[in-house]
Amino acid sequence: MKPEPLPIVPSVLIVMGVSGSGKTTIGIKLAERLGWPYLDGDDFHPQSNIDKMHAGHPLTDDDRWPWLRAIAARIDELRAAGEHAVITCSALKRAYRDILIGDRADVRLVYLDGDKELIKQRLANRHGHFMPPELLDSQFTALEVPSSDEHPIAVSIAPKLDAIVDAIVAALPMAAHSPGG
């Protein structure tokens, strides 16, 4: 089912999904296609969160709130400057997305949808990331699939990269399709 484009051109696209769903790869390619800057939400984590995940411990909501508020502050800076960006962030729970998007009608959610077995295979082939594959179960447990009132662009991660990005771009208002648009 093709998502219905919203009439407003997004200033920020938040690419969300569990670890291993392809947020970084898809986010970078999407940003290149749109001619927008790419920001990795992981760069907003405090070192204590990175250390905790690297040690194999899932983050708590108390760990996440400052991280999410830092991303939201950056989103507000971009919007105030009239700039665009693609930001990747797991944003697994509705409460997290409410911080990132809230009443910002020009911030749009892109949900990367994939099954656990496919993602497990991808995680097994990924090296050097601070999120170990052992935490995948905790990611799926925490995941609250975006509901229709969040107006997500939901795409399957099963196709090839270009097809995924094509599907996302096709769901955007026409003015967002041109570089810097």
Image (cartoon, rainbow, N blue to C red):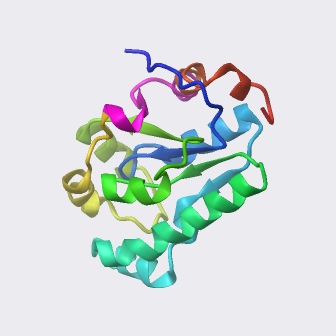
Magenta residues, as a range? 148-165
Q: Examine the structure image and report whether residue 30 is included in the region drawn in magenta.
A: no
Along the line of sight, the residue nearer the viewer: 180 or 141: 180
Q: Is residue 161 left or right of residue 102?
A: right
Q: Examine the structure image and report whether residue 149 is included in the region drawn in magenta.
A: yes
Q: Looking at the picture, how far across and down is residue 179, in whole percent?
A: 80, 31
Q: How many marks?
A: 0
Position above or below: 136 against 159: below
**In percent of the image, x 58 and y 51: which residue is there?**
87
Q: Looking at the picture, how far across and down is residue 174, in whole percent?
A: 68, 19
Q: Which residue occupies the extreme top position in the image? A: 1
**In percent of the image, x 77 and y 37: which residue is there?**
35
Q: Which residue occupies the extreme bottom position in the image? A: 48
**In percent of the image, x 50 and y 25: which residue is there?**
160
Q: The N terminus is located in which quarter?
A: top left
Position above or below: 28 against 173: below
* Image quadrant assignment for residue 65: bottom left
Position above or below: 106 against 18: above
Q: Which residue occupies the extreme front position in the image? A: 103
Position above or below: 7 against 72: above
Q: Looking at the picture, how far across and down is residue 155, in whole percent?
A: 42, 28
* Image quadrant assignment for residue 31: top right
Q: Is residue 37 left or right of residue 95?
A: right
**In percent of the image, x 40 and y 49: which residue is there?**
20
Q: Is residue 61 left or right of residue 45?
A: left
Q: Looking at the picture, how far across and down is residue 28, in whole percent?
A: 64, 44
Q: The C terminus is located in which quarter?
A: top right
